[in-house]
Image (tube, rainbow, N blue to C red):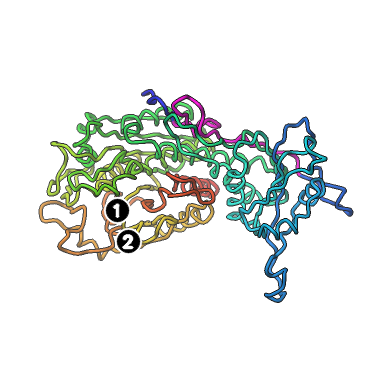
Amino acid sequence: MQRVPRGFSQAAGAAGPAGAVNGHGAANSVMTAVSALEPLQRRAGDPTAGTGLQPGPDEGVDVLVAAIAAAPQTTVREDTEEALHPTPQPRRGAVETALGYEVDVAARAATAGVTGKAGETLLVGPPSAKEGSLPAKLIFLGVGDESVQSMRRAGAALARATRGAQLIRAAVVDGLDPAAQQAFVEGFLLGGYTAPRRGKTPAGPPMARKMEVTGLDPEALNIAEITARAVWLARDLTNLPPDVATPEWMAGQSRAVAARAGLEVSVLDEAELLRRGFGGMLAVGSGSAHPPRLVQVSYQPESGDGEHVVLTGKGITFDSGGISLKPRDAMMAMKMDMAGAAVVLAAVEAAAELKLPYRVTAVLALAENAIGGSAYRPGDVVDTYNGTTVEIGNTDAEGRMVLADALAYAAAELAPDVLLDVATLTGAAALGLGQQYGALFANSAQLLAGMEKAGRTSGDRVWQLPLVHEYEYALESVTADLAHVAPPALKFGAGAIVAALFLEKFVDGVPWAHIDIAGPMRAGSDSHEVSKGATGFGTRLLISYLRDAAKGS
């Protein structure tokens, strides 16, 4: 495996509680170690009886957390004080901690405008007479209606509010169902992520070193940690600069992931791609000094073969647009054009950690779309893996070319029962759905329903767009079997749909779904469990879908 260039860690997010390093070797982002404690006892009678949330000075707890929920809807007049400043509702442990810190939570919340909304925080310090005997910080954490979404947001807010802490003890999930508990831990671990960085300037404070959570279900914790590690891996790989994350380097990272997870891996270099007819990938990578790679990483359960789910990911490690050059501003984010490949790699490692009962394979189509004397051109006719010829209309529509090869290869050689692809494919999808939703296409109603359910459950939300086969005339070509974009003279819209129709030509009738993540693949600022930079969008979606499929198998 290639060595990681100085100043960066190698896919550290997936390896557990280890993060990216700066130029001095100091960790920028290390995942908090989370552990479960016994549930709190229910209060009976006098509130001073307590619930057991009483860390001693020798336990090293520096942050104590108790939950407050949003006030229920009432019928009081809108101009009353309660309507204007609804009082948050204490959850298990909140009354005891308030008494211990001698704080009137209702009054303090009213002054601060805190209502118990998910993600709100109310910070309290110990009274001077108790300094040293109580944790230095008490945080009342808003959990809203305690739904999965609210708990995920509460966890993310807590992660950001406790940076630099050594040990958190949190009474937030007692009595909640496992899905809500998982969401809280997942939100915490994702909200605390920061991107790898390189340089002399110091990084901000790290995530809290440890967090103990009362009443936490061990399986909910396990699933949350597996999911968060996978998202960290996808974010780490996507955030790295293109001078680091070349196709060959990404292939090396895939080998490292496979080695630690006990997965099978194979890598096709440019000579093997040429020998086996991957014309789309070779065309896209022809102008780059970093030749393309096709990576296959496979998980096989001990119980037998079973069904086979194949995940394909677009892996354009940098997209200049090629001869159809992008504008400067549009080019700056194009180190992230390999987000789909990062997502499927992370998902197959998660499948192994979850010990799913069926086979899962990730196929990463890796190439750099650069400008050079040997770069492919508009007007070229390219022979793809399955023999279909494609007339190139725009070299900046390179993603569908590498996916055409990857999908055709998967359909012909891997015998998939389900074929999924994840790609930062079209600006049209981002324009239509913005940065909160991925565009979802599928040729199977059952697969479509499964992916939509996974989107609702995971937080990676998707929106179905139609495969309008009446639009296929936009892909007609005089000189080849297909045009890969609609000709400009046609003045044809529906760019995301046309791209999906093109990809469908290469799946050979296999149940298939295409997730276009061009919009939500990056964020300009922190928002709930999404951190600034690469979002890892699609990772939670795939893991949720794979887990649901395991339940039905």
Position of residue 411 relative to residue 12, above or below, is: below
Residue 484 at x, y percent in the picture: 21, 52
Mark 2 element type:
loop
Q: Are marks 2 and 1 in contact (CB under 8 Å)?
A: yes
Position of residue 36 relative to residue 390, above or below, is: above
Left or right: 2 in relation to 232: left
Rounded to the nearest angstrom, the CA distance separating label 2 from label 1 is: 9 Å
**Can residue 258 be seen in this snapshot?**
no
Residue 343 at x, y percent in the picture: 42, 42
The residue that appears at 47% across and 55% down in the rendered structure is: 461
Q: Along the line of sight, which residue is nearer the eye, 328 or 435?
A: 328
Classed neighbour count for the residue bearing mark 2: other residues with Cα under 10 Å, few (<14), some (14–19), many (≥20): some
The image quarter in which residue 60 lies: top right
Q: Along the line of sight, which residue is nearer the eye, 34 or 482?
A: 34
Q: Is residue 527 magenta?
A: no
Residue identified by numbered label 2: 467
The residue that appears at 22% across and 31% down in the rendered structure is: 289
Residue type at mark 1: give it.
Answer: Glu
Residue identified by numbered label 1: 504
